[in-house]
Amino acid sequence: MSTDAKRAPAQKRSDKGSPGNNGADASPQNDLAATTPEVRRELLRSMLLQRRFEERCAEAYALGKIGGFCHLYIGQEAISTGVMSMIRPDDYVITAYRDHGQALARGVSPRAVMAELFGRDTGSSGGKGGSMHIFDAKTNFLGGHGIVGGHVPVAAGVGFAIKYRRGNQVCVCFFGEAAVNIGAFHEALNLASLWELPVVFIIENNRYGMGTAISRSTANEDVLVRAKGYRMEGESVDGQDVFAVRECMARAVERARKEKRPTLIEMKTYRFMGHSMSDAASGTYRTKDELEENMKRDPILLLHNRMFEAGELTEGEMHKIDDEAKAIAQDAWDFADASPEPPLEKLYTDVYADTSS
Amino acid sequence: MAVVTYRDALTQALREELQRDDRVFLMGEEVAQYNGAYKVSKGLLDEFGPMRIVDTPITELGFAGVGVGAAMVGLRPIVEFMTWNFALLAIDEVVNAAAKMLYMSGGQYKMPMVFRGPNGSALQLSAQHSQAWESWYAHIPGLKVCTPGTPADAKGLLKSAIRDDNPVVFLEGEMLYNTKGEVPDGEHIVPIGVAELKREGDHCSVITHGKMVLVAMKVADDLAKEGINIDVVDLRTVRPIDVEAIARSVQKTNRAVVLEEGWEICGMGSQVVDFIQRECFDDLDAPVLRVHQEDVPMPYAKNLERAAKPDAGKAIAAIKKVMYLD
Ligand SMILES: Cc1ncc(C[n+]2csc(CCOP(=O)(O)OP(=O)(O)O)c2C)c(N)n1
Ligand SMILES: [Mg+2]
């Protein structure tokens, strides 16, 4: 089966608002974010692919096929899917180490992502980056970065380059809520607002940085007030609701594209797994009850329910979409597993670029 | 050949490269309206405008990262640090982002950018403002590190650095800006990674770089009066290091002194000595000696500062020692 045929909605431009769509609509105030049943199905497909793919990542990790740090995105998929569905292929995306879901939602080949996790030659970075460093020039996916907050100024730089070239792309930058206490965050947001750069900064507030609750790390838990400090537009949104994510992205993207102004968005979410593969989903820093309570707002379930209630999705169709997602994940696994390790000569390549000019 | 200052040679390089390629821009504190803290960017704002000569707030980490992002998507940033002492605040972007982007992306994202500014000790600036950083950056695969000691090398290497598709750490000698030297007219390029034999002699090799090149030249003049003739090998670039040039010289003279501004432990000299013992073991007639800053933070008082710094007298003593003349 060709996995690349099953691209996420990031690659589709069919999501213009259509009048007469039904109950699962985004608010009428924003046409760009309005959805049709087809678009909603794509959103569901994208989220399910991430979920099924990462479930296999956990399995592969337990088998030792994936090593090192591996941070799963499970529980946060409405954000990646919602955000990517609102940007163009020529826009830029940059993120932190919790990057598999975002890469898939952006349209990076599941085979290339899985092969990267397996440390294979066919991986997106030829096996040199691993889980935390997914890069894909074809989809303007500018990486997976491992230093908390370190990539936030880089996003401002991408915005600077867009403006320098008088382009109308935007750069979307994801990071966790713990990154707002890093100096690089402050420096980047000040510059982005000062220089009016087309960047959308997205705080994925899953309430924990590893085992530290936001209340134990951040003097003012209302992270959105940071926007005011930089004279920047800010919004807070339910990150479990893919429609809410899309609406707020529509406004931010418009602002970046048309007015060349940055936005800070807090997307409230929750991670359903441990911080990485080396810790339990609950335990010393959060209770099982809290976890279970939050898992009731599974973003995939919420979307499924809305579509189901609107009568546009049968259980049979849901199964079919789910089976497809599983098949893509299986195909990615098989591909990665059958791929060779990078040849030893490649140890020494890509340290320096050949200067041609 | 015109005689120009090291500062003007750098300005020429910046101007020529800004004219040559509109993807090149200069960014840093006080580079535009103020004409540069050390006036290296004098006149460039008028010529190229505020989109290409960009004043930043005091936000080293922030604007170094902006440079990295701009380079990732095809621009060719020149990031100026007011001095390299302040670049410590940005070192994450230099080391963890710029140096590794190509590798961790499997060759997808190159980093055609330059980080530049004044390096090394000045006069009575004491502990925080008077330091030589080359060994820190030379340690990092993925970076190239230039340390020009003359106006001609400053110009030629900066032009190479700007045209290079890799991140280049460009360390200008803070005390060299007013020094003068001949710079070839017209297009003048010095390749990165190629040392230059600045003085020829048979008795001892002095291997050095950056500001210490001038000290070595003075040493060569002084010793010549005593009938001692030394090779002065100016590395010019400390990553990559021109090992062949070092070996050629030491195989001829059979003795070597390594002269540098920085501290002893894990300094550039440690690496040069390692190359020498591997490449020239059978050629050596004496242990290789090193001359460097004393192992203390830079003091303020004139006499202490003088005592802390490497200088011609210390270099001459070391040379005489390896020649068994003391
Ligand atoms: C500068 C830095 N310090 C510490 C770490 C180790 N570390 C990795 S992830 C993490 C927690 C970050 O939490 P958050 O930003 O909320 O993102 P999340 O993991 O929740 O997605 C820490 C402390 C790091 N990678 N970088
Ligand atoms: Mg978090």
Image (cartoon, coloured by chain):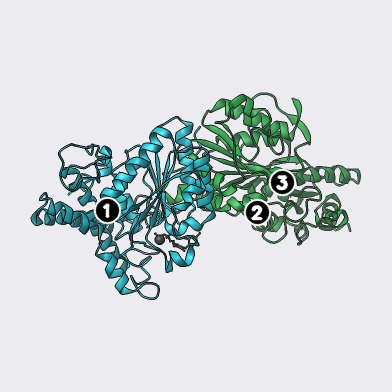
Chain colours: A cyan, B green
Q: Is residue B7 left or right of residue A149?
A: right
* Vertical relation: B130 (above or below) A88: below
Q: Is residue B130 left or right of residue B96?
A: right
Q: Does the closest atom of ligand 2 sit within 8 Å of the Cβ of label 1?
A: no
Q: Estimate the spatial distance between the alpha carbons at disc 3 and disc 2, rounded to whole Å.
A: 12 Å
Residue located 58% across and 25% down the image: B19
**Badge 2 density bin: few <14, some 14–19, many ≥20, Cα 10 Å:** many
Check if mark 2's residue and mark 1's residue have beta carbons within 8 Å.
Answer: no
Answer with the quadrant where ligand 2 appears in the image.
bottom left
Res A105 visible? no
Tell me: residue B47, above or below residue B31.
above
From where the camera sits, is residue B91 visible?
yes
The answer to whether mark 2 is within 8 Å of ligand 1 is no
Residue under numbered circle 3? B209
Q: CA distance from mark 2 to mark 1?
A: 51 Å
**Residue at left offset 62%, top offset 24%:** B47
Q: Amino acid at mark 2?
A: Ser
The kind of secondary structure element at disc 1 is: loop
Q: Categorize mark 1 by other alpha carbons within 10 Å: few (<14), some (14-19), many (20+).
A: many
Q: Residue at x 47, y 67 (%)?
A: A216
Q: Amino acid at mark 1?
A: Asp
Which residue has dot 1 on it?
Answer: A241
Image depth: mark 3 or mark 2 in front = 2
Q: What distance separates the C-alpha of mark 3 from that of mark 1?
A: 60 Å
Q: Position of residue B59 (x, y in %)?
A: 59, 47
Query: x%, y% of residue A51?
Result: 25, 58
User: For mark 2, what is the residue?
Assistant: B135
Comparing B167 with A247, the one in front is A247
